Image (cartoon, rainbow, N blue to C red):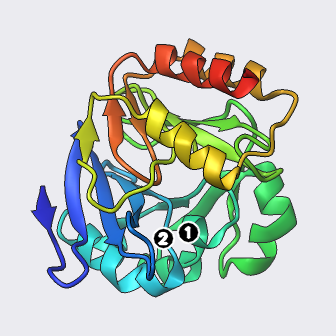
Amino acid sequence: MTVTNQQSGTNVHEIADGIYRINTPVRIAGGAVGFSFNQYLIVDDEPLLFHTGPRKMFALVHEAVASVIDPARLRHISFSHFEADECGSLNEWLAAAPRSAPLCGAIAAMVSVEDIADRPPRALDDGEAVALGRHTVRWLATPHLPHAWECGLLMEEHTHTLLCGDLLTQGGADLPAMTESDILGPSEAFRRQMDYYSHTRDGDQMLQRLAGLQPTTLACMHGSTWRGDGAGLLRELAASLKR
């Protein structure tokens, strides 16, 4: 792990072949645990950044990306759904990477990104794949899972890494970059406190579909990245949501 900013603690860790987790821990005033914000950089012929981080974190994330590649090389700025921590600095990234474009689901493009972004997005249909070079990402529409009509996730097929957005969010600012320990318990405890899931009727079906992809790395937006039997963990999450 490389710390790229001593003041914020922003750090970079390679979680899979050519995929880097950028993490900034945040101490919340009055809170005992804190929180973390993660972005994922896929280094390839057409580099991709998944999540931008909030606009006010742009300088920190840019500095971290620059420790791995020239940020101007980025070609795809992607995210799960339209929210500040997902795409708050989208336009700053489009300016920093002149050949880049937003990469998002068709619904997000229609309802938000075509208006907000300084360049037109590439809108992906459910199941559509994008070849980056050695890596290929596939868009999986997950409307309202965990929240937002336009929500979706990316599966990176070369490394079997599921860029899983807000699924399995864990509270805490001092978590390991990568773990094989239990994250379902902590993430479900966090969900029960804040209940940020929409509880869509199709949630179980969508989680079973994700499990069928057999991911071995779950790249969470908040908390540790997890390695192991991703299919089993996603099915356990589905069962917990049913309960």
**Which x, y percent locates residue 130?**
54, 40
Q: In this view, does 9 lie above or below 104?
A: below
**Which x, y percent locates residue 176?**
23, 48
Q: Nearer the viewer, residue 157 or 51?
A: 51
Residue at x 57% of width, y 81% of height: 91
Q: Which of 150 and 78 is in front in this view?
A: 150
Amino acid type at mark 1: Asp
Dot 1 or dot 2, earlier in sequence: 2
- In the picture of the structure, the residue carrying the numbered disc 1 is 85
**Which x, y percent locates residue 194?**
66, 55
In the picture, measured across the screen, residue 19 lies left or right of residue 68, that is right
Q: In this view, does 235 lie above or below 88?
A: above
Query: In which quarter of the view is residue 159 placed?
Result: top left
* Number of callouts: 2
Q: How far apart are marks 1 and 2 (CA)?
A: 4 Å
In the picture, measured across the screen, residue 180 lies left or right of residue 203, that is left
Estimate how packed mark 1 is, as few (under 14), some (14 to 19) or many (20 or more) residues with alpha carbons within 10 Å.
many
Q: Are marks 1 and 2 in contact (CB under 8 Å)?
A: yes
Q: Is residue 19 visible?
A: yes
- In the picture of the structure, the residue carrying the numbered disc 2 is 53
**Which x, y percent locates residue 191?**
61, 46
Q: Is residue 38 above or below residue 60?
A: above
Q: Can residue 164 be seen in this view?
A: no
Amino acid type at mark 2: Gly
